[in-house]
Amino acid sequence: MRIAEPAALRSADGDGVRATFLELFFDLVYVFALTRISARAFEDLALEGGQSTWSAVTGGGKTLLLLLLALWMLWQGTAWTTSRYDPYHLWLQVIVITALVSAMVMGVAVPRAFSGTGLAFAVAYVVANVGRSAILLLVLRRIQYRRLKLRMLITYCVSAVLWLAGEVLPTDARVALWSTALLVEYLGNRFGWPIPGLGRSTISRWDIHGRRSDHADRLRPVRRRHARTRATIRP
């Protein structure tokens, strides 16, 4: 664990391509959250036409897609950060821990995200994204990268207002505000986080380094361990 130096850009030679334990744990928590969405979708289909369906409350598949896109935004932001910067740095590990706790809370909140657990889902999502940008803004020394993180932080703070405001509104208004918040974030990501007076970033500044760009590699040790376990218990 490195504390003295601020989070540094990775070199392009592929050093440190092995995922850390925290990164693997975060991926597993993310998979858990995805299974919660899958379970909810299955129950929507199984109960379709009944009075107690989730679709009667949430609007069905469109809002499930909204939750899925929120989880994807959380995962890709965290994966990009650990690919771009030194994951063994103390503050980068804080970012990953915050993201995995947030993903777990979001996964638990998925079944009632548009009713009783909407606040938990929204707060967890906001904390992960705003916290990641704020930490990177504080620990990076190079001004060009600090400006990028400042634009990201401003964008996530704007969308955070929509996420939190949506929680206190009826379902239809909540879906509209949360969809708008995601649209702001995805458009910001796509066009270089443009902010009036601060400009926008070029795509080259977002490039990830080394072979860690293939984050599917993270789960390969887990799959191999699972396969060995099955082979061991096979009669």
Image: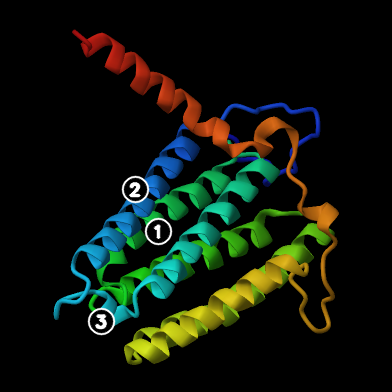
Query: Image quadrant of residue 43?
Result: bottom left
Q: Does residue 169 sit above or below 110 in this rendering?
A: below
Q: Residue at x 72, y 72 (%)?
A: 151
The mark found on residue 56 in the picture is 3
Please name the residue shown 74% across and 70% down the image. Answer: 193
Residue kind at label 2, given as amino acid type: Phe
Real-space Cα separation, disc 1 to disc 2, in angstroms: 12 Å
**Residue 167 x/y as whole percent:** 36, 84
55 left or right of 95 in image: left
Q: Secondary structure at mark 3?
A: helix
Mark 1: few/some/many CA within 10 Å (<14, 14-19, 20+): many
Residue 29 drawn at (x, y percent) = 38, 46
Q: Is residue 105 above or below residue 92?
A: below
The disc labelled 3 sits on which kind of residue? Ala
What number is the disc on residue 102?
1
Sequence order check: which comes first, mark 3 or mark 2?
Answer: 2
Task: Tell whether 147 sits left or right of 61.
Answer: right
Q: Does residue 20 appear anywhere in the picture?
A: no
The residue at 54%/64% (across/down) is 129
Q: As displayed, is residue 123 above or below residue 40?
A: below
Q: Amino acid at mark 1?
A: Ser
Check disc 2 and report the residue beneath it: 32
Task: Compute the Cα span from label 3 to label 2.
Answer: 25 Å
> Do tag 3 and tag 2 residues touch (Cβ < 8 Å)?
no
Left or right of 41, for residue 148? right
